[in-house]
Amino acid sequence: MYSNKASTSSTPMKTGNLLIDVYGMKPDEEYNSLSNRKRYVVNQIIRQLLNKKELIMI
C-alpha cells in the first residue's frame, strides 16, 4: 500500500482545483501517511527496547 519513497512527489499533476501527486494522494493525505509510517517505526523501536528490558536514559 505504501511506496518506499518517503518524500513528496516531484511531479504533481493539476486536476481541477486539487493538486494530486503521482501516488494519487492529496498533499495532506500524503503527509498523514508519512506521519503514520513514522509513528509505526517509533513504536517498533519502543517495543524492541521494551522487549530487551533495557532502559536507555537519554
Image (spheres, rainbow, N blue to C red):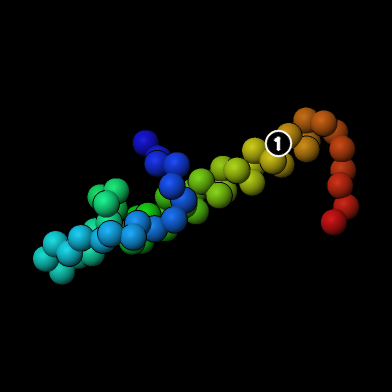
In-front residue for pair 32/5: 5
Residue 9 place in picture, x, y as percent: 35, 57
Question: At 33% from the left edge and 60% from the top edge, which residue is drawn?
Answer: 10
In-front residue for pair 52/20: 20
Asked if 8 appears above or below 42 in the picture, the reply is below
Number of numbered markers: 1
Question: At 78% from the left edge and 38% from the top edge, which residue is drawn?
Answer: 49
In the displayed image of the protein, which residue is found farthest to the left? 16
- Write down the quadrant of residue 48 in the picture: top right
Left or right of 4 in this view: 13: left
Left or right of 20 in this view: 1: right
Left or right of 7 in this view: 27: left
Asked if 3 appears above or below 52 in the picture, the reply is below
Q: Label 1 belongs to which residue?
A: 47
In-front residue for pair 10/27: 10
Left or right of 40 in this view: 28: left
In the displayed image of the protein, which residue is found farthest to the front? 10
- Amino acid, disc 1: Arg
Asked if 29 appears above or below 55 in the picture, the reply is below
Position of the N terminus by quadrant: top left
Question: At 29% from the left edge and 48% from the top edge, which residue is drawn?
Answer: 23
Secondary element at image label 1 = helix
In the displayed image of the protein, which residue is found farthest to the bottom? 17
Residue 39 place in picture, x, y as percent: 57, 48
Residue 19 place in picture, x, y as percent: 23, 64
Position of the C terminus by quadrant: bottom right
Question: At 50% from the left edge and 53% from the top edge, which residue is drawn?
Answer: 35
Please rate how many residues cluster around mark 1, counting C-alpha atoms within 10 Å: few if below 14, some from 14 to 19, many from 20. few
